[in-house]
Structures are given as structure tokens and as C-alpha cells.
Image (cartoon, coloured by chain):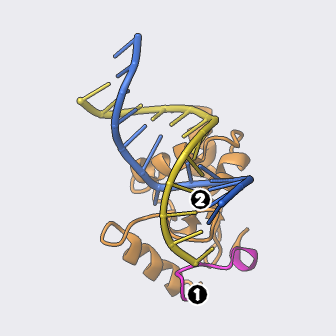
Chain colours: A orange, B blue, C yellow
Amino acid sequence: MNAFTLAVIENISKIPKGRISTYGRIAELSGNPRASRQVSRILSTMSSRYQLPWHRVINSQGRISLKPGMGYEEQRRLLEDEGIEFDLQGKIDLKRYII
DNA sequence: CGTGTGACGCGGG
DNA sequence: CCCCGCGCCACAC
């Protein structure tokens, strides 16, 4: 496992309950601003093994990237359980919750 | 070694 | 707000 992957795991682990971050932001913090896609892949493959708060990572538009029936519902429920609110379009106010 | 594929992001219509 | 196109990049085939 490379340094970037390690940094991503570390940065995601640090997201506090009730707050969120984005794929792009995690990529930046981890040293590669252009690797947002890798962040998503790392999440899908490492989230269970490293017990990451995977649900606290959303996209730059403030929306859940998972598709309905493929995890969307669970991620939304986990976030709502932490007090995060969604608007009518299923969007989260980034300014309010991002780290 | 090409080609297709995304839990992405940004700009534009 | 929705929909596209394009750039990006590791990975699977």
C-alpha cells in the first residue's frame, strides 16, 4: 500500500461524527489534488477492513454518489443518524458540515 | 498494450 | 436544477 492510500485512510478516519468531507478534499489533504477517483476506489475496497467512516465522504456537489439500491439509502440513513440534514434534492449544505 | 470503467470535479448550456 | 463533455487515473480484461 502506497503513501497516498495510507494518507487517505488516515484523513478519512479523522472526520468527526456529524461532519463530512468530499472525495476531492480528501485527495488534496492526502497530497494529490487530482486523485478524487482513487479516493472513491480506496473507500470501496478498504472501508470495511479499516473500519472507516466511509459514509462521511460525499461529492463536491454535496450529494451522495452511491446509486439508489446500491448503498445510497444506507449512507443517507447513517448521515441522518448523525444529525446531517438533506434538502429536497437530496443535497447536503457543505458550508454547514464540511470539516 | 489498447479499451472500458467508475463512491470524481469543473465548466457550460 | 438537470444534463453533457472532458480531464483525470488506477484497474480489470
Q: Which residue is mark 2?
A: A13
Query: Which comes before the other along the chain, label 2 or label 1?
Result: 2
- The image position of residue A10, as x and y in percent, is 62, 51
At x 65%, y 64%, the residue is A21
Q: Are marks 2 and 1 in contact (CB under 8 Å)?
A: no
Asked if residue A89 is among those painted magenta in the image, a careful observer would answer yes
Q: Please tell me if label 2 and label 1 are on a single chain.
A: yes
- The image position of residue A57, as x and y in percent, is 57, 63
Q: Are there few (<14), some (14-19), or many (20+) residues within 10 Å of tag 2?
A: some
The secondary element bearing badge 2 is classed as helix
At x 65%, y 47%, the residue is A27
Q: Horizontal placement of A96 versus B6: left or right?
A: right
Instruction: For mark 2, name the chain.
Output: A
Magenta part of the chain: A86-97
Instruction: For mark 1, name the chain.
Output: A
Q: Are there few (<14), some (14-19), or many (20+) residues within 10 Å of tag 1?
A: few
Can you tell which mark lies on residue A18?
A: none
- The image position of residue A82, as x and y in percent, is 55, 83
Q: Which residue is mark 1?
A: A87
- The image position of residue B2, as x and y in percent, is 40, 19
At x 57%, y 49%, the residue is A9
At x 52%, y 81%, the residue is A90
Residue C1 vertical placement versus A49 (above, below): below
Residue placed most toward the observer, A16 or C5: C5
Asked if residue A92 is among those painted magenta in the image, a careful observer would answer yes
Q: State the CA–CA distance, disc 2 to disc 1.
A: 26 Å
* Quadrant housing the C terminus of chain A: bottom right
Q: Main secondary structure of the magenta part?
A: loop
Residue type at mark 2 is Ser
- Count of marks, rendered view: 2
The secondary element bearing badge 1 is classed as loop
